[in-house]
Amino acid sequence: MAGSPGPDAPIERILPDGCVELILHLDEPFRAFSEDARSQPQPSAFVVGPSTRFLLIQPPRRLTSLGVRFRPAGARLLLPMPLHEIAERTTILDDLIGSGARSIRESVGNTVDDGARVQALEAELLRQLARSRNGGTPLRPVIRETLESRGQVRVREVARRSGLSPRQLERRFLDEVGLSPKSLLRLVRFQAVLDSIGRRQAVEWAEVATDCGYSDQAHLIREFRAFSGEPPLTLRRAQGPLSRQFTSPQRLRVFFERD
């Protein structure tokens, strides 16, 4: 994406979904803010690990950035380490894939428009995948079920259907997803709430809570605060143009659809 948000672009709140994201800033970097309002520029090429916490970021005046969001467990095919090692933090791409990061930056940086950038990045990721020693993720059917159920399945049931004990499932999730099965299920239910309210003209929170598998409205609001740092109504009013992209019906449809 490219553009010029202006000198006073708002600080935006990006909500967690358990995915890994690869980000390239080809112009000025975004600024990342901590909860105590301290900030620092993001790297030019980095990976945002799977997280249960929201991010606070501010777009620059000149914006030329490209991002790839991997569905849960998808990034494990490319990255050489268990994903729990990069969870809840941002890691410079060079520290993860070495010389492959330079190749990605150069290939994408030598392009002149968004379409060419996407093609160049896809080609580089396919080359990285071909060099990877990781096989297909055994958790793929489990992740698909988790998403299709919109998080409304118990960990023990997921373990039973996968043929793993709860302890084995936990270890496999930490390796391939970066989060525990319970954490991913909670995040998927939270994303289902965002999808549900985005489809409604008038939101009845008790009804949304029931539809999304919460015990009651208070339970939904507690979970919403845990992941977003805000109650639902406050967050909806405060969303900016960037954060709305992450909760758009189109993005959420891709998140939940069968891969």
Image (spheres, rainbow, N blue to C red):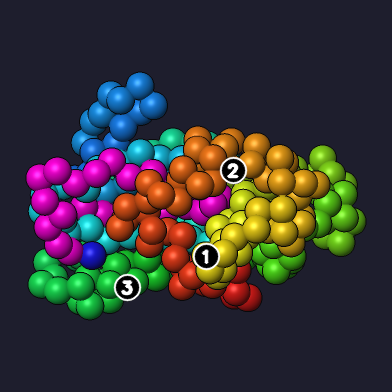
Tell me which label, 1 or 3, sits earlier in the chain.
3
* Residue 198 numbered mark, or none: 1
Q: Is residue 105 visible?
A: no
Q: Position of residue 59 (x, y in %)?
A: 22, 48
Q: CA distance from mark 2 to mark 1?
A: 15 Å
Q: Quadrant of the N terminus?
A: bottom left
Q: Position of residue 92 (x, y in %)?
A: 32, 41
Q: Residue 13 occupies which quadrant of the picture? A: top left
* Residue numbers of the magenta segment: 2-27
Picture residue at 50% right of the left edge, 35% below the top:
229
Mark 2: which secondary structure? helix
* Residue 224 numbered mark, or none: 2
Q: Is residue 170 visible?
A: yes
Picture residue at 12% right of the left edge, 66% below the top:
110
Mark 1: which secondary structure? helix
Q: Nearer the viewer, residue 110 or 52?
A: 52
